[in-house]
Image: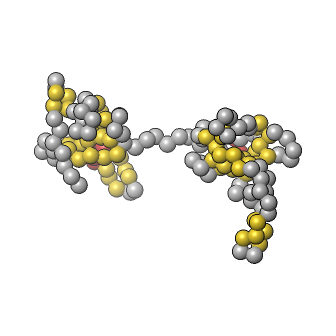
Amino acid sequence: MALIQLNKKDGSFLCPDCNAPLKREEGGPVQIVNGKVDMDATLPKYVCESCSVFYRELLNSGFFDKFPLQKPKKKLLRTGDIPPMELKRGADGKATCPRCGERMDYVEGQPVRIVDGKPDMENVKDHFNCKECNSVFRRIATTDYFQWSEK
């Protein structure tokens, strides 16, 4: 844990990495994290959006500790709420994932391979694979429609 003393300019603290003014965010209510009381959430923090970090003062000492800025998790659709849909590859060979909104890779069908003495049928047919939410969308018969599938 390396403590940093932040410089001030025009009444606001500056980011030591990029010299941008830090945005002050007031502390919130006490939170329970992993079954323990988190009092740090009640303290104000100084946020640098461009560096994706925030600083929190340690015991009113004038020294600050640096933390990574948590990105809010995207809400995933439940798999039962995703109807079969037509998915098409864009110019980059990818399509938008209906479950999380990120870009999915297109996997072309390959011949059956033998893995550990058993036939591996997972990549035999064309499908889309999303690395962000670990979803697989497989083609329905010979149509242009794809449906969420278990791996």
Q: Quadrant of residue 62?
A: top left
Question: Where's the C terminus, which quadrant?
Answer: bottom right
51 or 1: nearer the viewer: 51
The image shows residue 36 at horizontal and vertical percentages of: 34, 56
Residue 24, percent from left and from top: 27, 31
The residue drawn where x is 76% and y is 45% is 147
> Could you tell me if residue 73 is visible in this image?
yes
Of residue 139 and residue 30, the one placed in the foreground of this image is 139
Residue 123 pos. (x, y %)? 74, 57
Apparent side of residue 100 relative to residue 108 in the rendered image (left or right): left
Residue farthest along the right direction in this orientation: 142
In this rendering, the count of numbered labels is 0
In this view of the protein, can residue 29 be seen by the observer? Answer: no
Judge by depth and name the residue closer to the eye, 86 or 41.
86
Which quadrant would residue 48 be assigned to in this image? top left
Residue at x-position 27% and y-position 35%: 18
| Furthest-left residue in this view | 61
Estimate the x, y position of residue 149 in percent, counting from the top left. Answer: 73, 51
